[in-house]
Image (tube, rainbow, N blue to C red):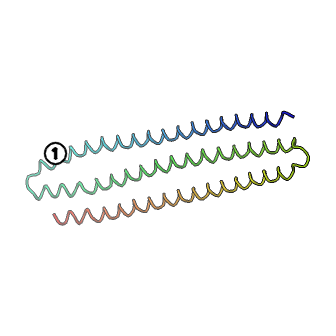
Amino acid sequence: MFAIPEQFSNATKANFESQFAIFSSLTSKAFEGIEKLIELNMTAVKASLEESSAATRQLMGAKDPQEFFTLSAAQAQPTADKAVSYGRQLASIAAGTQAEFNKAAETQMAETNRKVVSLVDEVSKNAPAGSESAVAVLKATIGNASAGYEQLAKTTKQAVEALETNMNAAVTQFTQAAQKAVPKAAARK
């Protein structure tokens, strides 16, 4: 007689533990992504400072305006390439973190769904006579919620893939534009 409340109590406790585990996992993944982003930015800043210093020394050592403009134009392409590389690394970090979030959420939802179905099956075994229709409605509701989540996960995954494709296309277009612009700028000088 007291088995059903105890089952719900255990299920609630397990659900809270599960939610805490997913929260901890997502927090960990977020910090990993932030660490990678900070490392990327620190590397970029350090390299930029070193390269700017060297470029300034070169430009200050120019003997005439023609040499100055030639040196300036020669530095434009590597700078554009580095900007493109930075953008790709940034996109990679963002996509990797997003993929980890999706993976953790999918795993958690599958586990939660399994536990809920198990609980409903267990409760339905001990349900009083005549409650079959209520149990059937509950099972159908759970099935519909699962199907809705699966569709949402599929749509989210497609949206992330489309975002990655669009980001790569934008980076490619930027690279091509930069490669065309640098020789034109050098020719004008």
Observer-nearest residue: 60 or 123?
123
Q: Which residue is mark 1?
A: 57
The location of residue 175, given as percent across then percent down, is: 35, 61
- Residue at 27 percent across and 64 percent down: it is 181
The location of residue 52, given as percent across then percent down, is: 23, 46
Vertical placement of residue 21 versus 87, above or below: above
Observer-nearest residue: 6 or 157?
6
Observer-nearest residue: 4 or 162?
4
Indicate the quadrant containing the C terminus: top left, top right, bottom left or bottom right: bottom left
Vertical placement of residue 13 versus 130, above or below: above
Answer few, some or many: residues within 10 Å of disc 1's Cα (few below 14, many 20 plus, some between 14 and 19): few
The location of residue 143, given as percent across then percent down, is: 74, 54
Observer-nearest residue: 159 or 83?
159
Amino acid, disc 1: Arg
The location of residue 55, given as percent across then percent down, is: 20, 48
- Residue at 30 percent across and 56 percent down: it is 80
Say left or right for 138 vs 179: right
- Residue at 78 percent across and 36 percent down: it is 7
- Residue at 48 percent across and 60 percent down: it is 165
Say left or right for 46 vs 159: left
